[in-house]
């Protein structure tokens, strides 16, 4: 639908867009789809999803892409910005009957040029382990649907593990599996391991070890997506009840929660350093949540419909030590320096981000880049700058694309919050700089943040986990429930227990979700009771981000956004996977092909 006053021009599909780094260009020859390139009739089908893996092929072309369209699953060599896609030669193609693939994930640890392990979740609840290179089907989990009969919403390998994987369902349950174990011939019996505010974790009760190893019941309604933190120790889950819940995966404990402004949350992702989480959903917003302070620090408004995917761009997130305050050189030199910083590899970015965790008091400026796509067919890019992250700090030269307006007075009756200065803590538990301290300038907001934000940092220290999630889960397999029983001794009352109220989203009632939430017998509370609290600040109480760019790039709703080193990848429900070359990354072959097509 064209924007008001925009007419035909506003409704055009964009093939390029410009940011401060330069021009991103759609590579029409690098489009992946079904071999016939016919738009897929997406009515009633599951979202198109895309997974990547690098098999370290010595030919230098080791990237592989997997995507699902309707009942079909495809596996291709991904040539990216280098060469045109050859859709006539899929490495593997599968067509399923009676069920549809809904999500998939590669095991990057075990991938080789001869073999890859790909997990595929299905609409009927099963999970399949396949090797598309060998064209083998290794195992089928939940085959008889004795564990869960509802649609698989997300499946991921546990970071650092070759055998453990996690599966979420639209039932609101999440299960931990081991590929080495069977699922049994009878329905599993469970024993309570840990219970908290609107979540519980059970172990599988059986004489011999079987799947699932753990059953998580999280929130009310569908568990739409989950994401592991970069270090693999924490798990962020978003549900149809509108809550983001962050767990210590190793200790099976709730770390913090957040409530959407309206409706269910559909997607979630972590910043490269694990300090921030972004969630999107049915309120058409992107919400930025601080892991250390367990509170909302910003919202972004740019989409006109539900946000389906959020993702951080590890390659454009930039960090700059600001020790040399004077800059000798031209503006062009400085721009080149910023572009160089923005194009660093993700591991380099993460190491630079870690400098913010040191006790060194030298100021470091940082800009996080993330993106979002939605059912409005639009792609939005956002910059999370330090005037949002640390509003009490002086302005930095690297701050860009954030409008600032003076806040003349606090919200009605709220006390003015004085600024404080602290040095950065480290990941082992010290607080970050006083995020709750606010200067007189707040970007895109009409008043100071809610005064209750001060309470968020009081107990924000985190216990370091007892080891990696993989280690404790693997040991659990060997020692059984007794191992987990020792963990439950550390159970403690979460700091948000008194604030966290169970409630349904207002948006799901009229949605076409297949989850019959009205059948739940749990008591429902008024969503308005969380509005204005730490769980869900009012719109005027937190900074409001504006997108760097907001472009219509497809005819159908967008379902994929992935940032790669040379490009970013999007996909729509018609089954077209598009490659957008980063500035300066279009090779000569690509340019000649594009000119020929145009």
Image: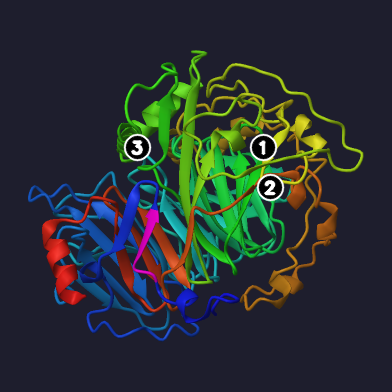
Going by the image, does 8 lie left or right of 22? Answer: right
**Disc marking residue 258:** 2
Counting residues from the start of the chain, the first of labels 1 and 3 encountered is 1
Q: Are marks 3 and 2 in contact (CB under 8 Å)?
A: no
Classify the position of the N terminus by image quarter.
bottom right
How far apart in space, not on screen, are marks 1 and 3 (Cα)? 35 Å
In the figure, 229 relative to 176: above or below?
above
Q: Is 570 included in the stretch rendered in magenta?
A: no
Q: Pinpoint residue 301: horizontal percent, then vertical percent.
A: 61, 57
Residues packed near mark 2 inside 10 Å, few (<14), some (14 to 19) or many (20 plus): many
* Residue found at the far top of this picture: 360
Q: Pinpoint residue 31: horizontal percent, then vertical percent.
A: 26, 70
How far apart in space, not on screen, are marks 2 and 1 (Cα)? 8 Å
**Disc marking residue 335:** 3
Going by the image, does 505 lie left or right of 30? Answer: right
In the figure, 160 relative to 177: above or below?
above
Q: Secondary structure at mark 2?
A: strand
In the figure, 564 relative to 433: above or below?
below
Counting residues from the start of the chain, the first of labels 2 and 1 encountered is 2
Q: Secondary structure at mark 1?
A: loop
Q: Pinpoint residue 68: horizontal percent, then vertical percent.
A: 35, 71
Q: Are marks 2 and 1 in contact (CB under 8 Å)?
A: yes
Counting residues from the start of the chain, the first of labels 3 and 2 encountered is 2
**Disc marking residue 294:** 1
* Residue found at the far front of this picture: 330
Q: Secondary structure at mark 3?
A: helix
Q: Is residue 130 visible?
A: no
Q: Which residues are magenta?
A: 14-18
How far apart in space, not on screen, are marks 3 and 2 (Cα)? 37 Å
């Amino acid at each position: 639908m064209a924007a008001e006053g925009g007419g035909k021009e506003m409704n055009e599909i964009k093939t390029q867009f410009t940011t401060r780094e330069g021009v991103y260009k759609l590579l029409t020859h690098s489009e992946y789809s079904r071999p016939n390139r016919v738009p897929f009739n997406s009515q009633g089908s599951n979202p198109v999803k895309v997974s990547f893996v690098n098999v370290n092929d010595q030919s230098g072309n080791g990237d592989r892409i997997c995507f699902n369209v309707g009942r079909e699953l495809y596996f291709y060599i991904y040539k990216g910005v280098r060469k045109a896609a050859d859709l006539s030669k899929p490495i593997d193609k599968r067509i399923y009957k009676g069920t549809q693939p809904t999500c998939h994930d590669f095991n990057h640890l075990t991938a080789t040029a001869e073999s890859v392990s790909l997990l595929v979740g299905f609409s009927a609840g099963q999970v399949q382990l396949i090797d598309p290179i060998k064209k083998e089907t290794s195992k089928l989990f939940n085959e008889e649907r004795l564990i869960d009969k509802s649609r698989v919403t997300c499946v991921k390998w546990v970071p650092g593990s070759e055998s453990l994987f996690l599966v979420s369902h639209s039932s609101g349950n999440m299960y931990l599996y081991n590929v080495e174990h069977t699922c049994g011939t009878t329905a599993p019996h469970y024993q309570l391991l840990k219970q908290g505010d609107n979540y519980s974790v059970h172990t599988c009760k059986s004489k011999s070890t079987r799947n699932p190893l753990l059953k998580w019941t999280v929130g009310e309604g569908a568990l739409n997506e989950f994401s592991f933190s970069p270090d693999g120790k924490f798990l962020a889950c978003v549900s149809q009840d509108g809550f983001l819940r962050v767990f210590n995966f190793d200790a099976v404990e709730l770390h913090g929660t957040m409530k959407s402004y309206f409706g269910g949350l559909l997607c979630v992702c972590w910043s490269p350093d694990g300090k921030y989480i972004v969630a999107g959903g049915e309120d058409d917003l992107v919400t930025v949540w601080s892991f250390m302070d367990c509170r909302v620090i910003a919202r972004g408004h740019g989409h006109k419909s539900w946000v389906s995917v959020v993702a951080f761009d590890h390659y454009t997130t930039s960090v700059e030590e600001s020790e040399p305050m004077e800059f000798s050189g031209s503006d062009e030199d400085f721009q080149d320096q910023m572009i160089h910083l923005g194009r660093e590899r993700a591991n380099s970015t993460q190491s630079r981000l870690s400098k913010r965790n040191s006790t060194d008091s030298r100021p470091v400026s940082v800009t996080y880049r993330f993106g979002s796509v939605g059912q409005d067919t639009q792609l939005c890019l956002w910059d999370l700058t330090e005037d949002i992250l640390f509003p009490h700090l002086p302005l930095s030269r690297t701050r860009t694309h954030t409008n600032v307006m003076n806040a003349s007075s606090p919200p009605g009756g709220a006390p003015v919050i004085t600024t404080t200065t602290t040095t950065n803590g480290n990941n082992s538990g010290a607080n970050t700089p006083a995020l709750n301290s606010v200067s007189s300038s707040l970007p895109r907001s009409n008043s100071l943040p809610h005064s209750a934000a001060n309470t968020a940092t009081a107990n924000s220290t985190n216990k370091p986990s007892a080891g990696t999630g993989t280690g404790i889960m693997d040991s659990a397999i060997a020692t059984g429930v007794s191992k987990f029983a020792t963990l439950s001794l550390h159970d403690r009352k979460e700091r948000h227990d008194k604030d966290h109220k169970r409630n349904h989203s207002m948006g799901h009632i009229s949605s076409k979700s297949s989850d019959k939430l009205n059948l739940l017998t749990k008591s429902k509370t008024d969503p308005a009771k969380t509005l204005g609290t730490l769980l869900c600040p009012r719109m005027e109480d937190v900074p409001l981000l504006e997108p760097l760019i907001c472009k219509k790039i497809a005819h159908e709703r967008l379902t994929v956004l992935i940032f790669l080193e040379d490009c970013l990848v999007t996909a729509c429900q018609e089954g077209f996977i598009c490659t957008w070359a980063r500035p300066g990354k279009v090779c000569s072959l690509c340019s000649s092909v594009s000119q020929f097509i145009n």
